[in-house]
């Protein structure tokens, strides 16, 4: 299976769509965190362009515009704000068949309608979703709170009701509304350190230097990440159970390709060696194809690295090479004088030593990579709040603001990348502290980084994905590493 996602959708009905049930951990880390402290302080917040100002918990972190969590990643609790400027309540309710009305509340000349629903998350507990709507002269305002059933009543009283009482509708065109807490939060993204580079003679690839030392690999507990936007009716929660426990890893110094290997570079490899890829030998590849989910990655005759997206498609020289299997990627790196990165090498190059969520920092930046935005052909994953202009792959290095601490590019989005390691869900429970290379055998190989088909949760620095090594498709490529010969 290419993807495992969970969506909470407000559409015809409030439902939970399960693309695949989460695998059960051997311990109790899958249970929702039920510890919560009192909410003592609130601070003013204005959501730019929506006509909505209110008070939000001061210590909660804005991980995406208008979306707040007390502990991003380790707790499913999420407060989400949104608006439909110039719309009316009837229009919104006609589009969304809501659950039964839970209650109403008056505030600031507005009447809030509050709806509630419960959703059971396999192996994790029950998520309680409170969804609030109100209309003002400027449009319809939306405030939602999602949390575990253990916290639901407490946070309903401590967070949701105070937020609703504080909402102050203003014109979305107001000049005083163009700033707010988002600007301050963005400062948690980090500056890129000076980059030490080396050009590989074999293929002309620029590599960046990653110094020896320790970093923290993985995260503790189950990871809860919200992908969607309340206005689009899909809040898109995703749960990850194979990133724990967080553990210290020491790596020797190494060089890693600054970008994914390009079509042009791979063409040079083929010309010099006569190499035939797995797709060429077998006569088929797997391009993403619109249709039922189970048929989205068909085996299509004639698809290969030269014609990656369809029989009429032509691979572009400065794009990442795709439709390559693990064997193809490993063969290229050997020819180039290196090897595929281990999971640990890949993660350190992307994450650095400050445990960042994305290569550029801790706040998701829609302009930092090629993700599934408005141009993405996979409609159910489209994020309306971003558009990088590329429906599929983008030229490598197109998003310099997404650079990692060591200057590596495209480590979030564009294409998934093969690593050297076999996959095991419990690898981190048995991981060696020095230069780990993963399990000695397995059925699937690890991929990292996410692709053009993905959104913010899947492109985090710690996400692990896996498929059999023979898989080749048009959202999967690779980069190489070489051991450092100096420093």
Image (tube, rainbow, N blue to C red):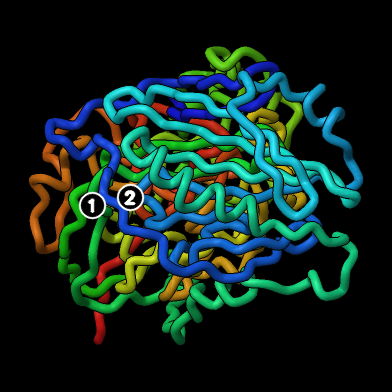
Question: Which corner quadrant holds the C terminus?
Answer: bottom left
Rendered residue at 33%/23% (across/down): 122
Residue 427 in the figure: left or right of residue 239: left
> Residue beneath label 1, please?
220
Element class at badge 1: loop
The total of numbered circles placed on residues is 2
What whole-number distance in Å separates the C-alpha atoms at marks 1 and 2? 8 Å
Q: In the rendering, which numbered label is found on residue 297?
A: none
Q: Is residue 443 above or below residue 356?
A: above
Q: Is residue 428 above or below residue 291?
A: below
Residue 277 in the figure: left or right of residue 352: right
Do callouts 1 and 2 mark residues in contact (Cβ within 8 Å)?
Answer: yes
Rendered residue at 63%/58% (across/down): 65
Q: Is residue 100 visible?
A: yes
Rendered residue at 26%/75% (across/down): 484
Element class at badge 2: loop
The picture quadrant where one finds residue 251 is: bottom left
Q: In the rendering, which numbered label is found on residue 74?
A: 2
The picture quadrant where one finds residue 231 is: top right
């Amino acid at each position: 299976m290419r993807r495992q996602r969970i969506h909470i959708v407000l559409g015809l009905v409030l439902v939970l769509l399960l693309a695949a049930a989460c695998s059960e951990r051997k311990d109790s880390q899958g249970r929702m965190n039920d510890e919560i402290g009192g909410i003592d302080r609130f601070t003013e917040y204005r959501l730019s362009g929506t006509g909505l100002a209110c008070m939000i918990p001061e210590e909660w972190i804005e991980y995406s515009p208008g979306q707040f969590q007390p502990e991003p990643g380790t707790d499913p609790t999420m407060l989400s704000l949104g608006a439909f400027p110039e719309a009316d309540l009837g229009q919104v309710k006609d589009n969304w068949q809501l659950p039964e009305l839970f209650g109403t509340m008056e505030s600031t000349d507005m009447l809030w309608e509050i709806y509630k629903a419960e959703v059971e998350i396999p192996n994790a507990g029950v998520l309680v979703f409170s969804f609030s709507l109100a209309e003002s002269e400027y449009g319809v305002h939306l405030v939602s709170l999602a949390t575990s059933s253990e916290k639901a009543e407490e946070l309903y009283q401590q967070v949701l009701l105070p937020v609703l009482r504080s909402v102050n509708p203003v014109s979305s065109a107001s000049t005083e509304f163009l700033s707010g807490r988002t600007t301050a939060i963005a400062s948690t993204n980090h500056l890129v350190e000076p980059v030490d580079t080396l050009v590989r003679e074999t293929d002309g690839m620029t590599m960046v230097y990653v110094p020896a030392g320790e970093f923290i690999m993985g995260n503790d507990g189950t990871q809860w990440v919200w992908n969607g936007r309340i206005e689009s009716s899909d809040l898109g929660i995703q749960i990850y159970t194979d990133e724990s426990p967080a553990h210290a890893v020491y790596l020797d110094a190494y060089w890693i390709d600054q970008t994914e290997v390009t079509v042009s570079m791979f063409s040079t490899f083929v010309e010099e060696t006569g190499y035939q890829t797995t797709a060429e030998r077998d006569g088929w590849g797997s391009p993403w194809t619109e249709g039922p989910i189970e048929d989205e990655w068909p085996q299509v005759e004639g698809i290969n690295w030269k014609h990656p997206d369809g029989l009429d498609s032509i691979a572009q020289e400065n794009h990442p090479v795709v439709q390559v299997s693990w064997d193809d990627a490993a063969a290229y790196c050997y020819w180039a004088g290196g090897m595929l990165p281990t999971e640990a090498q890949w993660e350190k190059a992307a994450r650095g030593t400050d445990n960042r969520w994305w290569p550029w920092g801790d706040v998701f930046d829609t302009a930092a990579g090629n993700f599934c935005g408005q141009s993405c052909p996979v409609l159910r994953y489209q994020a309306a709040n971003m558009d990088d202009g590329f429906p599929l792959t983008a030229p490598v290095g197109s998003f310099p603001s997404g650079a990692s601490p060591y200057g590596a590019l495209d480590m979030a989005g564009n294409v998934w990348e093969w690593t050297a390691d076999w996959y095991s869900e419990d690898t981190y429970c048995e991981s060696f502290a020095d230069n780990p290379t993963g399990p000695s055998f397995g059925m699937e190989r690890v991929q990292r980084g996410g692709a053009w088909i993905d959104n913010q949760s899947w492109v985090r620095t710690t996400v692990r994905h896996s498929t059999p090594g023979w898989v080749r498709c048009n959202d999967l490529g690779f980069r190489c590493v070489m051991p450092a010969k100096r420093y």
